[in-house]
Amino acid sequence: YLILYIMVDLFNYTRRASSVAHIGAIDLGGDNPIRIQSMTTTNTNDTEACVRQAEEIIKAGGELVRFTTQGSREAENMKNINVGIRADGYQTPLVADVHFNPNVADVAALYCEKVRVNPGNYVDPARKFIKQEYTDEEYAHELQKIEDRFVPFLNICKEHHTAIRIGVNHGSLSDRIRNRYGDTPEGI
């Protein structure tokens, strides 16, 4: 019965009201159309392959192209990828996908129109599944470390008009968060 109800309503929906976000040459949200984004599967250090695949995505209708930037070299190479795509006449916004390394996010914000970060692991290292109890004071200190490191990133993005996507999921929560909240909605 529930499935039937959902199927009947597939063509009778209303969009939730949202704010407009400016991402390079396009706007997202508000009354703008739903945007199509795809992610490359190429090695981000391979400029030619990235440009080629990004242009294939664009020609297929992609309005944003996302790249994994797992390290500083990949983030730095976004400059070359950006130059290559722009030289071919495309203004499609480029998105950097960053995990666990705020320095990478800082660099990516210089060369991409949008950077995706996860505040759950922005400063914290990759999960090691270590059990550790934090006092409220220690936990507050850890949160302050995140703020101290996140605000400079925000300032770089503001200066370069770089949009930020906050992406949170259970799989990328830090040990600190998982120890305090477990695998719960509160952890998110």
Image (cartoon, rainbow, N blue to C red):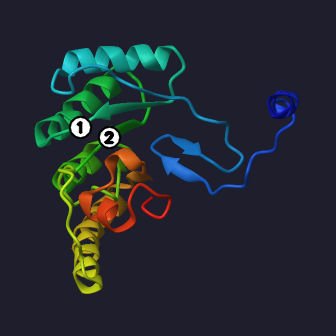
| Real-space Cα separation, disc 1 to disc 2, in angstroms | 6 Å
Question: What residue is rendered at 82% in x and 34% in y?
Answer: 2
Determine the image quadrant of residue 180: bottom left
- Disc sitting over residue 87 in the figure: none
For disc 2, the marked residue is 97
Find residue 149 and report its horizontal and vertical position in percent. Answer: 22, 68
Q: Nearer the viewer, residue 180 or 139?
A: 180
Amino acid carrying mark 1 in the image: Thr
Is residue 159 at least partly visible in the picture? no
Find residue 63 and report its horizontal and vertical position in percent. Answer: 51, 29
Question: What residue is rendered at 33% in x and 55% in y?
Answer: 160
Q: Is residue 185 left or right of residue 31?
A: left
Amino acid carrying mark 2 in the image: Asp
Q: Earlier in the sequence, mark 1 or mark 2?
A: 1
Q: Nearer the viewer, residue 110 or 40?
A: 40
Q: Residues within 10 Å of mark 1 (few under 14, many from 20)?
A: many
Q: Is residue 17 left or right of residue 36?
A: right
Find residue 34 and report its horizontal and vertical position in percent. Answer: 64, 36
Q: Against 88, is 98 above or below? A: below
Find residue 169 and report its horizontal and vertical position in percent. Answer: 42, 48
For disc 1, the marked residue is 69
Determine the image quadrant of residue 93: top left
Dots 1, 2 in contact, CB < 8 A: yes
Quadrant of the snapshot with the N terminus = top right
